[in-house]
Image: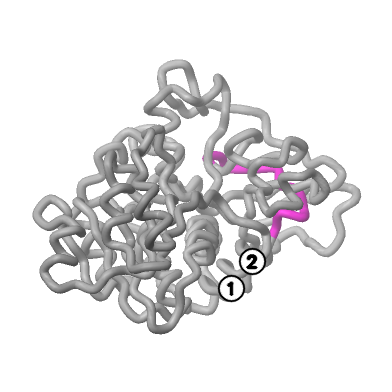
């Protein structure tokens, strides 16, 4: 749980389900970069339970729950949606003022148990490992971003920043049939992971800028997906876009970036921001994971118990060779 000085492990009462909720025993929860930065920057609230990339097993159902059973394995869509407000109608459920976002505005998955509205559940096949439910959320983020980029067969795409979201974007581009996928990052471990999950070319940005890569004979990109939050990235990435190309900002950043409006207009470029996903994209992500079309399970470099989660959140500020860390409450 979050405290004024960071995070700590604490005993809290087990959640009781409301009428339309179930209680999920958490099998695994991914440690997201947004949680790492929120704790580091003091953006959490006292007593908040983070964790929005999780799945597990239904252990209790509310009085109005139908179609879900105790013992059923599930992936959890953390984003609630009332379905009727302006934000939900525009496909922005994460901005819904009425519904809970688990791990953000409601208790999340860094816990043994979590209460989840039944409409935010997606079933998992009995035969797949339970922890695979934790892989759907970052992949859904990636699917939404790739959808915004509008790329497919015959196209080239650059993924700038190969942390967890960037690596999922690499996999999502592959499922979209993109011909050439280039990854760019600083961490040796994460660059190696980018190659392992499908990047054709991987650049070490400490040695080669994307501008230099293109100048040396690399083709311009039909889309660039900015997943690093590196200062100055957006103006450089706009330079390496082909006419009519898209730059999609996926990383959370407080930078006020200069944008060359003449190039944006004269070359017909598009610049947009992608945050989160809708429920259909989450369901698509679950399907891709459980059918093995994306090798999301190969990104896991470490598993920690609840007691090790506060330390892991600190270590991920400078990840080194760490790629993806899961909290496994049963450890």
Residue linked to disc 2: 283
Total tally of numbered discs in the picture = 2
| Towards the viewer: 6 or 190 | 190
Where on the picture, by quarter, is residue 65?
Answer: bottom right
In the image, residue 106 lies in the stretch drawn in magenta: no
For disc 1, the neighbor class at 10 Å (few under 14, some 14 to 19, many from 20) is some
Res. 131 in view:
no
Q: Give the vertical position of 195 relative to 329 (above or below).
A: below
Between 228 and 211, the one nearer to me in the picture: 211
Q: Is residue 247 left or right of residue 207?
A: right
Determine whether the residue tagged by mark 1 lies in a helix, strand or loop. helix
Q: Between 208 and 76, which is closer to the camera in this rendering?
A: 208
Mark 2: give few (<14), some (14-19) or many (20+) Cα within 10 Å.
some
Q: Position of residue 328 (x, y in %)?
A: 47, 49
Residue 287 tag number: 1
Q: Residue at x 65, y 61 (%)?
A: 74
Horizontal side of residue 103 vs 325, given as left or right: right
User: Residues in magenta?
Assistant: 110-121
Residue 207 percent location from the top left of the image: 9, 54
Direction from residue 274 to residue 254 in the image, left or right: left
Residue 183 - label: none
Tag 2–tag 1 contact (CB < 8 Å) = yes
| Residue 323 image offset from top left, x and y in percent | 30, 54
Residue drawn at point x = 57 percent, y = 28 percent: 48
């Amino acid at each position: 749980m979050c405290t004024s000085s960071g995070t700590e492990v604490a005993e809290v009462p087990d959640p009781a389900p409301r009428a339309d909720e179930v209680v999920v025993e958490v099998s695994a929860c991914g440690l997201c970069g947004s949680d790492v930065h929120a704790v580091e920057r003091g953006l959490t609230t006292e007593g908040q339970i983070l964790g929005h990339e999780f799945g597990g097993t239904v252990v209790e159902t509310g009085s109005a729950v139908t179609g879900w059973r105790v013992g059923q394995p599930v992936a959890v869509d953390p984003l609630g949606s009332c379905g009727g407000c302006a934000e939900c109608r525009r496909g922005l459920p994460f901005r819904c003022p009425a519904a809970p976002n688990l791990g953000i505005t409601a208790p999340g998955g860094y816990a043994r148990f979590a209460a989840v509205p039944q409409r935010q559940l997606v079933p998992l096949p009995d035969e797949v490992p339970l922890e695979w439910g934790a892989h759907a959320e970052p992949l859904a983020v990636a699917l939404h971003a790739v959808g915004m980029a509008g790329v497919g067969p015959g196209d080239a795409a650059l993924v700038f920043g190969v942390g967890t979201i960037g690596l999922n974007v690499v996999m999502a581009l592959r499922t979209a049939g993109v011909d050439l996928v280039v990854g760019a990052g600083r961490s040796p471990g994460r660059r190696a992971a980018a190659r392992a999950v499908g990047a054709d070319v991987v650049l070490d940005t400490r040695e080669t800028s994307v501008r230099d890569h293109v100048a040396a004979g690399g083709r311009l990109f039909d889309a660039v997906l900015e997943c690093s939050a590196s200062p100055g990235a957006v103006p450089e990435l706009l330079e390496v876009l082909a006419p009519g190309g898209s730059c999609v900002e996926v990383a959370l950043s407080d930078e006020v970036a200069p944008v060359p409006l003449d190039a944006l207009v004269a070359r017909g470029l598009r610049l947009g921001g992608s945050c989160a996903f809708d429920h259909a994209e989450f369901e698509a992500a679950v399907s891709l994971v459980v059918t093995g079309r994306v090798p999301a399970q190969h990104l896991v470099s470490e598993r920690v118990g609840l007691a090790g989660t506060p330390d892991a959140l600190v270590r991920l500020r400078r990840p080194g060779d760490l790629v993806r860390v899961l909290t496994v409450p049963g450890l």
